[in-house]
């Protein structure tokens, strides 16, 4: 019975430590940046490690030429690429935080988190 309580206390300590690490990781991810682009760099999107869009840059030539449809077509792949890169930052940070902790199946779960199309390839 006491062994079970000791194991429970140990698990609670580890959970508290992970909670602190997760908060720290969130702060770190806010400062990391990832950029996605499309159309040979005509549209660029910058996100932080949490996937929040911080900046969108559109080539002035597209704007002055009135290429609204092209801009719309290029925005989605640029955003998707930036978000995929931010997910990779997130996964890398989580993997570094959990080194030395036996979390069976974590690698597979993290690979599911990044999902298909997360290789950062430009789809245009």
Image (cartoon, grey):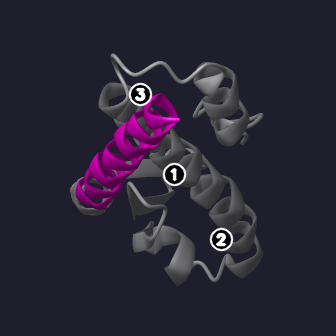
Instruction: Find the distance from the CA under tag 1 to the CA under tag 2.
Output: 16 Å
Badge 1: residue crowd in 10 Å (few <14, some 14–19, many ≥20): many
Q: Quadrant of residue 119?
A: top right
Viewer-proximal residue among 124 and 8:
8
The residue positioned 70% from the left and 80% from the top of the image is 68
Judged from the image, the secondary structure of the residue bearing numbered disc 3 is helix
> Which residue bears the numbered disc 2?
71
Q: Which residues are magenta?
A: 1-25
**x%, y% of residue 96?**
32, 27
- Left or right of 69, for residue 9: left
**x%, y% of residue 45?**
46, 62
> Which residue bears the numbered disc 3?
95
Q: Earlier in the sequence, mark 3 or mark 2?
A: 2
Front: mark 3 or 2: 3
Judged from the image, the secondary structure of the residue bearing numbered disc 1 is helix
**x%, y% of residue 57?**
41, 69
> Which residue bears the numbered disc 1?
82
């Amino acid at each position: 019975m006491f062994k079970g309580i000791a194991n429970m206390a140990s698990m609670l300590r580890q959970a508290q430590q992970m909670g602190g690490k997760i908060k720290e990781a969130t702060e770190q991810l806010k400062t990391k940046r990832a950029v996605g682009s499309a159309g040979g760099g005509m549209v660029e999107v910058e996100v932080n490690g949490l996937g929040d869009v911080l900046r969108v840059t559109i080539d002035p030539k597209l704007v002055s030429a009135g290429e609204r449809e092209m801009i719309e077509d290029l925005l989605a792949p640029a955003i998707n690429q930036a978000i995929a890169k931010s997910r990779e930052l997130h996964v890398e940070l989580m993997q570094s935080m959990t080194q030395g902790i036996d979390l069976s199946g974590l690698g597979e779960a993290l690979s599911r988190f990044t999902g298909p199309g997360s290789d950062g390839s430009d789809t245009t």
